[in-house]
Amino acid sequence: MPAADDDRLVREATRLFLRLRQAPSDPTRVAARDRFLERGVAECAAYNEVERAWAITGAGRRGQKRTFYALALVACVAVSAYAASGALRNAWLASHRTAEAPAAHLLASGDEVVLDAGTALRDATDGGERRVAVLAGAAFFEVAPDDRPFRVEIGGLEASVLGTAFETVRIGEAVTVAVAKGRVAVTADGERIVLGAGDRLDWLPGRAPKVTEIDPNTIAEWREDRLLAEGLSFAAAAEIIDRRLAGPVVVLSPALGRARVSGGLDLGQPLRALETLAAAEGARVISLGPVATLVLPAR
């Protein structure tokens, strides 16, 4: 399940849980909770994590006048615990992965890849085909010319090349492919698009791919701990910064998450980068260490 779906389920479970805490005997609220649980295993797991987070944070002992920060902490611990299941799945499937810093890897095909922090990649190369799958995060490939095509699978999209350098990025369900040199053929929803140097393709499942021209020198700047946030949503920029922090970054406002941001950020200092990003939107950052980092909207 994509991370965006994980977060959505935890937020929904948190709302239902807190409403029921306020009125445990309200049949309407009980029924709403039961309908949510009946939807499936993922919903049950999300609700269980919220209950566990409530106990871990001690928020249940704060009396009737619980603070916004206590409730936010419950949501963050729940998101952290539930999202960990996705990270564990990726860790199990991945043959290469990174923690809080980028790293270079040599693939079985002999080609080189640099993985951004928080990235997981599965190398499925065999004797007849060079194939990898980016399970999470961002990767920059330098593919040597070879008779065997080099294929990258990422979030329902496939990129195929013979010899080139390009980046793939996955943020939630959104996928980006940007070409630094050479040519890359991308297939999405049955449509095949050939990209050249300086082309960037952005794609969401169910939507038409969008191709724009960019400066090839700005591709995969995260390799040098830089992020040019032009045109990104606040949530997308926060997710990129999130890869370099121990706990999840949770943006406690859908409106703030949708806001468009701009400017250059130093990913070598991720918490400061997030604070800079938030300050530009009048928001605040509260670090809870390895548990989570909260971004609170302006009051």
Image (cartoon, rainbow, N blue to C red):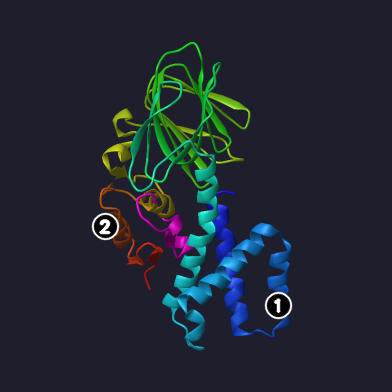
Using the image, tell me which numbered label, if any, was put on residue 272. 2
Write the residue at 44% across / 81% down: 67
Q: Is residue 139 above or below residue 254?
A: above
In the rendered structure, which amino acid carries the disc numbered 2? Arg
In the rendered structure, which disc, 1 or 2, sits on the residue that comes first in sequence?
Answer: 1
Task: Tell me if 195 is positioned left or right of 273 in this view.
Answer: right
Q: Nearer the viewer, residue 72 or 133?
A: 133
Q: Secondary structure at mark 2?
A: helix
In the rendered structure, which amino acid carries the disc numbered 1? Val
Q: Secondary structure at mark 1?
A: helix
Percent across and percent down for residue 29 are 68, 78
The image quadrant where one finds the C terminus is bottom left
Percent across and percent down for residue 47 are 61, 67
* Highlighted range, magenta: 243-260
Write the residue at 53% across / 53% down: 4
Residue 93 found in image quarter: top right
Residue 249 in the magenta stretch? The answer is: yes
Q: Nearer the viewer, residue 208 or 219?
A: 219
Graded by Cα atoms within 10 Å as few (under 14), some (14 to 19) or many (20 or more), the crowding at tag 1 reads some
Percent across and percent down for residue 290 are 37, 62
Q: Is residue 243 above or below residue 282?
A: above
Residue 259 in the magenta stretch? The answer is: yes
Q: Nearer the viewer, residue 47 or 186?
A: 47
Graded by Cα atoms within 10 Å as few (under 14), some (14 to 19) or many (20 or more), the crowding at tag 2 reads some
Most extreme residue toward the top, as rendered?
147
Q: Is residue 100 above or below residue 13?
A: above
Task: Tell me if 4 is positioned left or right of 43 in this view.
Answer: left
Between the C-alphas of marks 1 and 2, the distance is: 42 Å
In the picture of the structure, the residue carrying the numbered disc 1 is 30
Percent across and percent down for residue 27 are 73, 81
Write the residue at 32% across / 57% down: 274
